[in-house]
Image (spheres, rainbow, N blue to C red):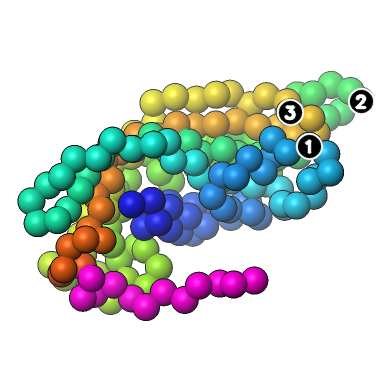
C-alpha cells in the first residue's frame, strides 16, 4: 500500500525541488548517533508514512487515509555562533520547505506517475493512487545536532489495487536491488 504513493511523492519532489541531494524512506537517518553521521547527503528529504486504517471497497480495492510526514534535513546555517538565516538563497532551509509544499499540496497521484507504469497514462487503467494531498501540520525548522530539521505533515486518501486482478495484469516486473 505504501510503495506506489512513495514512488509518486519521490518522483514529484525529484522533478520539482532541484536542491534535494538525498531522497528516501524515513529510517531515522538524522536521529542516529554521531557514528552514523555522513551516511546521507544534504539537503535530504525523508518520507514517513503513519499506520493506515484501511477499508475494503468493491473489487478487491482497499483505501485509507494516510498521514505522510516529509522530513527536510539541511546543514545548519551558522554565522559566528548565531544559528539563523542571514540571507535567503536557493539552498536555505525555508526556501526548500516552501518548494516541497508547492510541489505536494493539492496534488494527487495517478498510477502512471509511479515507476514502471508510464504506459498507462491517459488510459482507463491509470488509477488514482492517492487523492489530493493537504498539508495540515508544520514542525518549523529547528536545530538537531549539526543539522536543521523541519517536518511537514500531509494527509490524503491512498488506494491499494494490488489485490485487484486488473491491476495485477498491468503491474510491471519489479527487480529487487540486492546491494
Extreme left residue here? 58
Q: Looking at the magenta stretch, what is its main secondary structure?
A: loop
Q: Is residue 172 left or right of residue 62?
A: right
Image coordinates of residue 152 in percent, x first then y, are 49, 32
User: Of the residues under marks 1 and 2, which one precedes in the sequence?
Assistant: 1
| Residue 86 figure quarter | top right
Q: In the image shown, does 76 or 68 lie closer to the viewer?
A: 68
Q: Which residues are magenta?
A: 168-179
- Estimate the spatial distance between the alpha carbons at disc 2 and disc 3, rounded to whole Å: 18 Å
Total of numbered circles in the picture?
3
Label 1 neighbourhood size at 10 Å, few (<14), some (14-19), many (20+)? few
Image coordinates of residue 88 in percent, x first then y, are 68, 34
Q: In the image shown, does 30 or 109 lie closer to the viewer?
A: 30
Q: Is residue 158 left or right of residue 83?
A: left
Q: Residue at x 21, y 67 (%)?
A: 167
> Which residue in the protein does label 1 denote?
33
Q: Residue at x 47, y 76 (%)?
A: 175
Q: Residue at x 33, y 37 (%)?
A: 52
Label 3 neighbourhood size at 10 Å, few (<14), some (14-19), many (20+)? some
> Which residue in the protein does label 3 denote?
144
- Estimate the spatial distance between the alpha carbons at disc 3 and disc 1, rounded to whole Å: 11 Å
Rendered view: 157 above or below 128: above
Q: Nearer the viewer, mark 3 or mark 1?
A: 1
Q: Nearer the viewer, mark 2 or mark 3?
A: 3
Rendered view: 126 above or below 67: below
Q: Residue at x 14, y 56 (%)?
A: 60
Amino acid at each position: 500500500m505504501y510503495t506506489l504513493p512513495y514512488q509518486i511523492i519521490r518522483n514529484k519532489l525529484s522533478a520539482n525541488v532541484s536542491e534535494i541531494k538525498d531522497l528516501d524512506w524515513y529510517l531515522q537517518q538524522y536521529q542516529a548517533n554521531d557514528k552514523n553521521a555522513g551516511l546521507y547527503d544534504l539537503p535530504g528529504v525523508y518520507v514517513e508514512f503513519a499506520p493506515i486504517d484501511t477499508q475494503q471497497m468493491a473489487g478487491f480495492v482497499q483505501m485509507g487515509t494516510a498521514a505522510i510526514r516529509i522530513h527536510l534535513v539541511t546543514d545548519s546555517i551558522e554565522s559566528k555562533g548565531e544559528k539563523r538565516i542571514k540571507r535567503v538563497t536557493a539552498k536555505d532551509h525555508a526556501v526548500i520547505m516552501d518548494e516541497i509544499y508547492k510541489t505536494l499540496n493539492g496534488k494527487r497521484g495517478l498510477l502512471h506517475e509511479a515507476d514502471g507504469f508510464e504506459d498507462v497514462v491517459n488510459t482507463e487503467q491509470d488509477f488514482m493512487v492517492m487523492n489530493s494531498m493537504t498539508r495540515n501540520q508544520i514542525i518549523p525548522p529547528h536545530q538537531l545536532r549539526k543539522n536543521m530539521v523541519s517536518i511537514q505533515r500531509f494527509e490524503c486518501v491512498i488506494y491499494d489495487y494490488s489485490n485487484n486482478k486488473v491491476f495485477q495484469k498491468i503491474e510491471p516486473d519489479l527487480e529487487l536491488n540486492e546491494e
